[in-house]
């Protein structure tokens, strides 16, 4: 017998279920409304359906949905025709009493909500309105179709070289965003010049913002994919917050981006699912088994929590959650550590969960998991913040439309640039609230001790691209070291920090570097921010070691005496020196200051090797040389002028990277056996989200794990694989599967399927067991960035790539990086 | 200003034992009627209401209503320092942020004084409606404790059926099932052990054993316990004391739909 714990309640039965049924009827109404509009739209306009059909050629799921909807609509259309005609006939018959008759019909129809005639009837009556609706719907359909096309383009691109696409996408997005900001600005300007106010909020001035208000905004955001619309919802909400409870603005921003503090402080949520499920189980009295079942089915703990909740009657309703309370509790939960912290965490989550109403549980759970998944990018939050600040100024209605528009655009770009310099809402938000946009730039500047987002480079496919880009511009080439980005900060009071590319504090990882800092900074430097690459260094051979070596270095509690992997810091940029930000200075000046104020120390600190030449031959030689020196390739940067400033967080075209990988291609593909899979979450609910692959060792007759894979699959692939592999699920791994402790899959497969895989390169891994004993006695080899190419039906699992071959490939690769691979860069003409 | 002197300190110790598992922080509401406490557990599934009437203390003084927010774990730690026969005096100023406790032994030659920091607890008083229950079972508290413990071995929930004949506790779990039936008995000789049933209507309800076992922590307070039930309404488990009571309310479990 399965039982569920109800909440304490003294009401009669009807009260117990009241909340649930109310919810139900609401959604019913919503859907019926939706249906109505779509019906109205499609019925009267055949043109709408044709347009929709034309634009729906793509073989994509979402477009499929549209198609389906259209079909349904057409069906109903046919059915409704006679009725509609009848209604019309009736109307014409009773010409004189038209008015009365019509109202009567409407009334009658309204009384019977199940009647399918309603939309048709109303459409006849309000023909004009319908036309408007139709146009709107057509527009919507068109837009959706467009979105679909974009989607398809994006999915296709994933299977291509990921990095390029990423960069291109970023580019596109940046452009798109700029356009969107403009549109949004125009829209708001329009709205305010017509003096339309922002609708009233759900709480009173001075009160803490209710969590429900935020969740409602989240819900709106989640329901749309249009970025402009998302921005619109968020701006509206933020304006309310600024006007009514400005002290909550900072926490609202943090909750919207699902963070607790600036990244470099390192406090993160990301509570494990088992803990969350336990909290759900304990607070609702639902059996763990049931919760697990519905999680496997739905794939979203938020929804599971919400469903577990909304059937749960309460009478003594706990107080509504407020933003400050939720945020504080989340922060407390994240800070808990040590003895019995798990139990305390569950207790705190339970207290929050019990107070959740409607959709709150959903977003609360997702926040706790550390993934909000509502399609709200941090960029959008920043823009929304800027615009909301401008729009909530009291004098805003006096501004002309054009002026307001430019001001909105400016605000967005200012806040964005300030944020990339000083990624700390703790400082930006108060500055915005107390001053205005101009004041922000003065108040918030690059500050040593707070990591800024590093500038990123754009990938190029050939050296000629560089010349195309930098025609008639002074530029310089630098080695692209294969290490870890490191931003070294020194504060005036003497403390030092090292931050990673993602603004994590890595000071604990590099105590040795911190210790040596004084050696390479000249005494006249009292504060600085250096942009560097930390690279593993072989002290005996005096050469650079590959990234894989660096990645074996311990991340936490590194003691200087235990360090096995030595690093050398290669500095290539100076962003701040002695109280002055250098971000807006050209690279030439920054480099000059770098050289002036720092000293090279053999094997510990060096300047990135650079070369200034505009001849393609020189660049080619330099590239070959860089590869020979175990570097990844070259960075090419503009030297002078406004285009040579440091652009934090931007993937800029003023920096180009030329990687040997791009030039040389990825090499042979590998054929591997699928031995396990991981249950899909989110988008991949219902199919497997990732797979565990193995190579075959014919000597020992074992399958050795080599990597997890989750990229390169189309949606169709995922479904097909799921269908096929379901047949081969086995309860226990075969005795001849060899794998590490930490990568046990959720389900096991018998060794039947062979897949062709490509990867970026191979690395030694303590977790995977491929070729164990050949390259390293205990460690195996793993693939970096594996991606699925196709199924190899022609190969039996025993014919999969053997461990020996894997080892060979690994050794070859090492050879390539140590010696210069002569084929590289010489024939530049291959196809991409 | 509150001053309450309790002749048998053990009572307070037992009371704390009876609630501290269920709730962590609570307000002791002191008025001229006595000291009361009402709080729900974290999950809002159970509610505890206890009352110590003023006549249970000698003397009792409370000029103005006071809410003393106490962390129950801390209070029970302090109370552990009191002997079972000690006389306990509770004192608090109207504006105080501490509750002072004085323990005197029976020979009156050892006096210990403790102060416990108070906290602000944000709680609302919940109005519990008077309910005419369909079934009221009065039984031995020790028997109730035993049944709950025994059945917990089998399952995490128990079904309680009350009919004219008696009351049946049944549990069903993965390892098997079990049931204990107590018949209505007119055994006047052993009043403490008899089971008395007042019935308007048969009832059959499911409850979480975890909570019931938690409630039985109050067993030392009284030899008798009463279970009051109506369908769709929380169960009331009441232990009566000489000058007061402790009541637990527990929402029934509902069958899972799927």
Image (spheres, coloured by chain):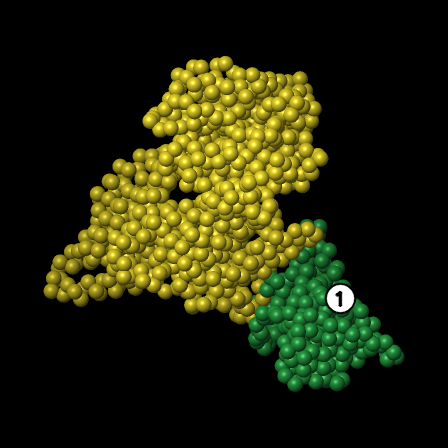
Q: Is residue B177 above or below residue A677?
A: below
Left or right side of A221 for A12: right
Picture coordinates of residue A757 (x, y %)? 51, 25
Left or right side of B54 for A804: left
Residue drawn at x 67%, y 79% as measured from the top left:
B93
Q: What is the quadrant of the C terminus of chain A in the image? A: top left
Picture coordinates of residue A232 (x, y %)? 35, 53
Q: Callout 1: 10 Å neighbours few (<14), some, many (20+)?
A: few
Total count of labels:
1
Q: What is the quadrant of the N terminus of chain A in the image? A: bottom right
Q: Is residue B145 above or below residue A424?
A: below
Give the color of chain B as drawn.
green
Residue drawn at x 63%, y 53% as measured from the top left:
A336
Q: Is residue B30 above or below residue A444?
A: below
**Badge 1 sits on which subunit?**
B
Q: State which chain is coloured yellow.
A: A
Residue drawn at x 34%, y 26% as measured from the top left:
A471
Picture coordinates of residue A65 (x, y %)? 36, 42
Q: Residue furthest left?
A: A96
Picture coordinates of residue A798 (x, y %)? 59, 19
Q: Is residue A802 visible?
A: no
Q: Nearer the viewer, residue A759 or B8?
A: A759
Left or right side of B52 for A667: left
What residue sits right under mark 1 in the picture? B77
Q: Nearer the viewer, residue A455 or A115?
A: A455
Please tell me whether mark 1 sits on a helix, a strand or a loop.
helix
Residue drawn at x 24%, y 44% as measured from the top left:
A48
Q: Is residue B88 visible?
A: yes
Q: Nearer the viewer, residue B53 or A786?
A: A786
Left or right side of A804 for A216: left
């Amino acid at each position: 017998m399965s039982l569920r714990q109800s909440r304490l309640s003294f009401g009669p039965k009807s009260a117990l279920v009241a909340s649930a049924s109310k919810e139900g009827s609401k959604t019913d109404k919503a859907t019926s409304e939706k249906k109505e509009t779509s019906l109205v739209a499609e019925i009267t306009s055949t043109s709408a359906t044709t347009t929709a059909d034309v634009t729906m050629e793509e073989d994509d799921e979402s477009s499929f949905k549209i198609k389906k909807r259209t079909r349904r609509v057409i069906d109903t259309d046919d059915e409704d025709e006679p009725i509609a005609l009848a209604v019309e006939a009736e109307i014409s018959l009773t010409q004189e009493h038209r008015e009365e008759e019509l109202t009567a019909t409407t009334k009658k129809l309204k009384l019977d909500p199940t009647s399918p005639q309603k939309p048709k009837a109303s459409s006849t009556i309000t023909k004009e309105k319908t036309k408007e609706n139709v146009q709107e719907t057509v527009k919507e359909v068109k837009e959706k179709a467009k979105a679909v096309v974009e989607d398809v383009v994006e999915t296709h691109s994933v299977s291509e070289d990921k990095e390029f696409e990423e960069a291109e996408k970023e580019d596109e997005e940046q452009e798109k965003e700029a356009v969107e900001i403009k549109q949004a600005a125009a829209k708001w300007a329009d709205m305010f010049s017509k003096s339309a106010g922002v609708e009233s909020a759900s709480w009173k001035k001075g009160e803490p913002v209710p969590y429900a208000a935020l969740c409602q905004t989240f819900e709106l955001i989640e329901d749309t994919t249009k970025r402009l619309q998302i921005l619109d919802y968020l701006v509206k909400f933020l304006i309310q917050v600024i006007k009514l409870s400005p002290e909550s603005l900072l926490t609202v921003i943090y909750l919207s981006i699902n963070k607790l503090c600036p990244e470099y402080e390192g406090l993160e949520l990301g509570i494990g699912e088992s803990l969350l499920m336990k909290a759900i189980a304990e607070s609702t009295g639902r059996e763990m088994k049931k919760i697990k079942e519905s999680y496997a089915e739905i794939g979203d703990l938020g929804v599971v929590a919400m469903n577990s909740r909304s059937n749960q009657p309460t009478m003594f309703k706990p107080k509504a959650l407020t933003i400050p309370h939720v945020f504080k509790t989340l922060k407390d939960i994240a800070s808990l550590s040590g003895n019995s912290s798990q139990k305390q965490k569950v207790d705190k989550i339970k207290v929050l969960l019990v107070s959740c109403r409607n959709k709150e549980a959903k977003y609360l759970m997702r926040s706790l998991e550390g993934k909000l998944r509502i399609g709200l990018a941090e960029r959008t939050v920043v823009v929304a913040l800027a615009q909301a600040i401008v729009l909530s100024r009291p004098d805003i209605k006096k501004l002309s439309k054009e002026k307001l528009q430019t001001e909105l655009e400016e605000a967005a770009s200012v806040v964005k640039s300030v944020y990339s310099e000083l990624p700390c809402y703790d400082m930006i938000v108060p500055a915005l609230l107390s001053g205005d946009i101009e004041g922000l730039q003065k108040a918030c500047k690059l500050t040593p001790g707070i990591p800024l987002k590093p500038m990123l480079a754009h990938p190029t496919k050939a050296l000629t691209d560089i010349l195309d880009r930098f025609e008639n511009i002074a530029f310089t080439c630098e080695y692209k070291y294969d290490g870890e980005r490191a931003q070294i900060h020194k504060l005036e009071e003497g403390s030092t920090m090292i931050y990673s590319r993602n603004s994590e504090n890595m000071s604990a990882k590099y105590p040795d570097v911190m210790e040596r800092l004084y050696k390479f900074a000249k005494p006249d430097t009292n504060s600085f921010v250096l942009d560097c690459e930390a690279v593993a260094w072989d002290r005996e051979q005096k050469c650079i070691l590959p990234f894989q070596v660096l990645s074996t270095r311990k991340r936490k509690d590194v003691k200087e005496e235990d360090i096995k992997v030595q690093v050398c810091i290669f500095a290539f940029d100076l962003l701040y020196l002695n109280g002055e930000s250098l971000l807006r200075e050209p690279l030439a000046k920054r480099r000059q200051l770098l050289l002036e104020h720092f000293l090279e120390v053999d094997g510990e600190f060096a300047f990135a090797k650079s070369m200034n030449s505009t001849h393609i031959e020189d660049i080619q030689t330099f590239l070959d040389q860089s590869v020979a020196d175990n570097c990844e390739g070259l960075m090419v940067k503009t030297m002078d002028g406004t285009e040579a400033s440091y652009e934090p967080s931007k993937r800029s075209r003023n920096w180009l990277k030329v990687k040997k990988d791009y030039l040389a291609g990825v090499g042979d593909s590998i054929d591997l056996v699928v031995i396990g899979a991981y249950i899909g979450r989110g988008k991949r609910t219902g199919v497997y989200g990732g797979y565990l692959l193995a190579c075959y060792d014919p000597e020992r007759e074992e399958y050795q794990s080599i990597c997890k894979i989750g990229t390169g699959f189309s949606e169709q692939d995922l479904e097909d694989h799921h269908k096929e592999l379901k047949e081969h699920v086995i309860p226990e791994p075969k005795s001849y599967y060899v794998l590490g402790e930490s990568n046990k899959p959720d389900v096991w497969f018998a060794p039947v399927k062979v897949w062709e895989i490509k990867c970026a390169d191979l690395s030694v891994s303590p977790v995977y067991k491929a070729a164990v004993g050949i390259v390293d006695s205990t460690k195996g080899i793993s693939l970096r960035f594996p991606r699925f190419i196709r199924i190899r039906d022609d190969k039996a699992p025993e014919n999969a790539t053997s461990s020996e071959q894997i080892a060979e490939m690994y050794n070859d690769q090492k050879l390539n990086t140590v010696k210069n691979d002569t084929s590289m860069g010489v024939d530049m003409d291959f196809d991409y | 200003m509150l001053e309450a002197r309790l002749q048998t300190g053990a009572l307070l110790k037992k009371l704390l034992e009876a609630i501290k598992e269920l709730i962590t922080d609570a307000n002791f509401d002191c008025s001229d009627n006595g000291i009361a406490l009402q709080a729900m557990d974290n999950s809002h599934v159970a509610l505890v209401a206890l009352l110590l009437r003023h006549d249970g203390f000698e003397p009792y003084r409370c000029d103005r209503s006071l809410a003393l927010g106490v962390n129950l774990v801390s209070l029970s730690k302090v109370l552990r320092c009191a002997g079972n026969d000690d006389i306990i005096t509770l004192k608090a100023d109207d504006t105080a942020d501490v509750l002072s406790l004085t323990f005197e032994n029976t020979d009156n030659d050892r006096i210990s004084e403790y102060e416990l920091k108070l906290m602000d607890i944000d709680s609302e008083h919940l109005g519990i409606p008077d309910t005419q229950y369909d079934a009221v079972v009065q039984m031995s508290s020790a028997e109730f404790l035993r049944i709950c413990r025994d059945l917990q071995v089998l399952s995490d929930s128990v079904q309680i059926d009350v009919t004219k004949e008696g009351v049946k506790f049944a549990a069903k779990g993965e390892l098997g099932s079990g049931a204990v039936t107590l018949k209505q008995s007119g055994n006047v000789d052993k009043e403490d052990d008899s089971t008395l049933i007042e019935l308007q209507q048969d009832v059959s309800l499911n409850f979480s054993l975890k909570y019931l076992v938690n409630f039985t922590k109050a067993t030392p307070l009284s030899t008798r316990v009463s279970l009051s039930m109506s369908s769709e309404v929380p169960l009331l488990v009441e232990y009566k004391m000489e000058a007061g009571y402790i009541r637990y309310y527990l929402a029934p479990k509902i069958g899972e739909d799927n």
